[in-house]
Amino acid sequence: MRASVILAHPYAQSFNHAIFGQVCATLGGLDVPYYAHDLYAERFDPVLTVEELGKKPTQDALVRRYAEELMASDLLFFIHPNWWGQPPAILTGYIDRVIRPPHAYDFPPDDSGGGLPIGKLAGKTGVVFNTSNTEATRENDYFHDPLEHIWKACVFGFCGIEKTHRTMFRIIADSTPEQRAVWLQEVDGTTRSVVLP
């Protein structure tokens, strides 16, 4: 078993960074090899190039590395804040450039891309930890929790991942150190549960 842990938050003292640290610590404690990437710290370029459209291989060494690690991993962790009901642009760019054909999904040879995709990440587990400053009732009733749909259907489902878990921690702006400690225990428990189901 191997894991990939992807963080998308620009502020090094954010709770997202604490979640990232906890996931890595738990995986390490369970002797699970993992790849860990802070997209902002690594200055990942999120802009999909013309040359990368379709199935064309990328010339970007970092994108190639991310893609190889994605395919080699059984557990995929994504950690990011809720910004406008979506991931930060840097993570959306990761999805554009890394989670793409021909490795994450593809189409049958006679399909130009308008049919149903063949998910190539089947058997993997997708885990998302989000933070938000939006109250749960408003998130669910007014915004209809767009991140749930983005991850479960548009990303994981599209690529064949059926086993998913997502947790939203809120409200971050008003949280105390004690509350954050409890949340990190939850992160630890969730990480253990996907490693040792």
Image (cartoon, rainbow, N blue to C red):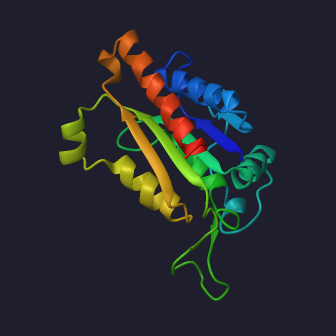
Q: In x, y percent, where is residue 185?
A: 47, 24
Say whether residue 163 is left or right of residue 196: left
Q: Residue at x 53, y 15 (%)?
A: 13
Q: In x, y percent, where is residue 169?
A: 37, 30
User: Which is nearer the eye, 135 or 94?
Assistant: 135
* Relative height, residue 126 to residue 35 (above, below): below
Q: How many marks?
A: 0
User: Which is nearer the eye, 97 or 71?
Assistant: 71
Q: Say if residue 193 shows up in the picture.
A: yes
Q: In x, y percent, where is residue 16?
A: 50, 26
**Quadrant of residue 38 within the rendered picture:** top right
Q: Residue extending furthest bottom?
A: 110
Q: In x, y percent, where is residue 84?
A: 35, 40
Q: Say if residue 43 shows up in the picture.
A: no
Q: Residue at x 41, y 24 (%)?
A: 183
Say whether residue 154 is left or right of residue 58: left
